[in-house]
Amino acid sequence: MHSDRQYVTALARGLDILACFDLRSPQLSNAEISKRTGLPHSSVSRLTHTLIKQGYLEYNKQEGSYRLGLKILLLQPCVLAGAGVSKLAEHCLEQVADELGERVVLSAYEDLSMVVVQGADGNRPVLTRVQIGVRYGLTGSATGRAYIASSGAHEQQQILQQLAQRDRGAALDLNEELGIATAMYRKDGYCVSLNTSGAGMNNVATPAHLKSLGRRVVLTCGGPKSRVTSALLHDRIAPCLLRAARHLEQAFERPIN
């Protein structure tokens, strides 16, 4: 039982159901939702029924599963517009991407993962465009390392404890990376990941503290290791990202009208 008397448990459970869906799991059954949320099947059935009626979920009869409703799309531009992130960050990211000729992504921490908020591809032809809303784990990436390394000790422990409850293996991996990532961040102001997940990608990331939003975001840039070498990350890309992060911080010094 939640101790906050103003806390609406039914609403929180409905939102937990919506948060279950991601690009890797765009459709989920009642049983899968129940497993992910820890809610009884009967509660999930009532909540999914309500979310369908409200347009936030749709039911695929052939698959016997649910997917997010198109109504969710109405919220995305409102979120970015309300925070002012899209307007203020877009120009900054495009400048950096054009200067470096590589993809630059702005991500924010949410629910034990990093979520893409904005991105720019620069003037280099790309096969896939930046997808806003894509989620990445905290482990094995420059983005996750930069966020956890720039966190205070209390927040780091909270994240590790919460992650351990959900994925003990990921928590152990993150705990192993934490020392190296923190040392690198304190020394250089950024973190790197080389040959990420064996996919041949080298990346560098640095946080920006956006005071008017009350949160940190992370700027990340990189590319295939055949083109973006470790030396290039440290000598050219990292300094450019650090300057961009400071510009963003200055832009978010005061409340956005």
Image (cartoon, grey):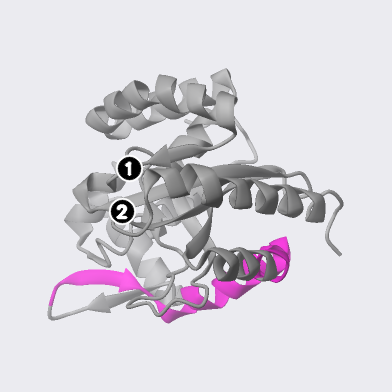
Which residue position holds label 2?
225
Q: Nearer the viewer, residue 82 or 58?
A: 82
- What secondary structure predominates along the stretch shown in magenta? helix
Residue at 50% x, 21% y is 183
- Above or below: residue 256 compared with residue 125: above
Residue at 42% x, 19% y is 179
Q: Residues within 10 Å of mark 1 (few under 14, many from 20)?
A: many
* Residue type, numbered disc 1: Leu
Q: Dot 1: what SS?
A: loop
* Residue type, numbered disc 2: Lys
Residue 8 at least partly seen? no
Q: Which residues are magenta?
A: 63-90
Q: Is residue 220 left or right of residue 65?
A: right
Residue 217 lies, in percent from the top left, at 60, 48
Residue at 48% x, 73% y is 72
- Per the rendering, the mark at residue 132 is none
Are the residues tagged 1 and 2 within 8 Å (C-beta)? yes
Which residue position holds label 1?
194
- Above or below: residue 247 compared with residue 118: above
Residue 47 at least partly seen? yes
- Report the label total: 2
Q: Give the CA separation, mark 1 to mark 2.
A: 8 Å
Image quarter in which the C terminus is found: bottom right
Residue 225 lies, in percent from the top left, at 30, 53
Residue 48 sits inside the magenta stretch? no
Residue 105 lies, in percent from the top left, at 51, 60
